[in-house]
Amino acid sequence: MAKRGPYEKGEAKRGEILHAALEIFATEGYRGTSLRKVAAKCNLSLPGLMHYFDSKEDLLTQVLRMRDETARLRQQERTDPDGYREVIREGARTPGLVELFVSMTAAASDPAHPAHALFAERYPMLRERVAVYLRERMEQGAMRTDIPPERLAALLIAVADGIQLQWLIDRSTDMEQPIDDVMSLLSLEPGER
């Protein structure tokens, strides 16, 4: 049964706000964007905007959740390195979201922060997804097997997150190459199988 009435309208407005915030943060940056700009884009006052969220941190957390869900839907069928590279390229095209991600990751270390639950869910899910891909490569004989796929998945995610930090400081940093380099170190050459 479809939702009706004020709840449906409230959820629609909340979705509109999140889409607007995602777009604005992606193009203008996390630090350079005021929530008033997001409110104006949605024809709301700042208090009107905040009516839909528990706090500014909650709004920012929901923006990241939407970013991840959108990326997951686009990459749902892809677990290969090319799909992963496209996610990295998207980050380079949306520096404000990378900045938001890095800032919120640090803030999420506090269990009371609204982003804590997002990251507590995100990392195990990512590690499992990457581990599945690595396990498949190992079973195909294309990747070394002396390190368990779960540990390699954590390593690859750490490299990806770390290179984003470096890229925020120096935009000439290649975010794809370190991932390719680690994959090369893990891959077996035809003569080594």
Image (cartoon, rainbow, N blue to C red):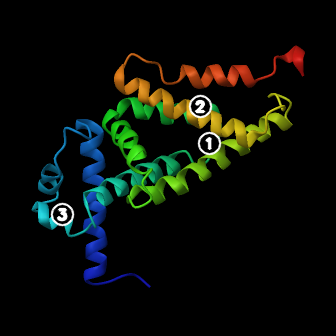
Residue 161 percent location from the top left of the image: 50, 34
* Amino acid type indicated by mark 1: Arg
Q: With respect to residue 34, does 12 lie above or below?
A: below
Asked if residue 191 is positioned above or below residue 165 in the image, the reply reads above
Quick one: 10 or 131, which is closer to the camera?
131
- C-beta proximity under 8 Å, tags 2 and 1: yes
Indicate the quadrant containing the N terminus: top left, top right, bottom left or bottom right: bottom left
Residue holding disc 1: 78
**Element at badge 1?**
loop
Left or right position of 178 against 115: right
Q: Which mark is residue 3?
A: none
Question: Percent x, y for residue 36?
Answer: 12, 52
Relative side of 25 to 47, left or right? right
Badge 2: how crowded within 10 Å, few (<14), some, or many (20+)?
few
Q: Amino acid at mark 2?
A: Asp
Amino acid type at circle 3 is Leu
Residue carrying label 2: 82
Q: What residue did someone put label 3 on?
A: 49
Q: Is residue 44 above or below residue 185?
A: below
Point out residue 57 in the picture as x, y percentages from the top left corner: 30, 56
Of labels 3 and 2, the one closer to you: 3
Crowd rating for badge 3 (residues with CA inside 10 Å; few <14, some 14–19, many 20+): many
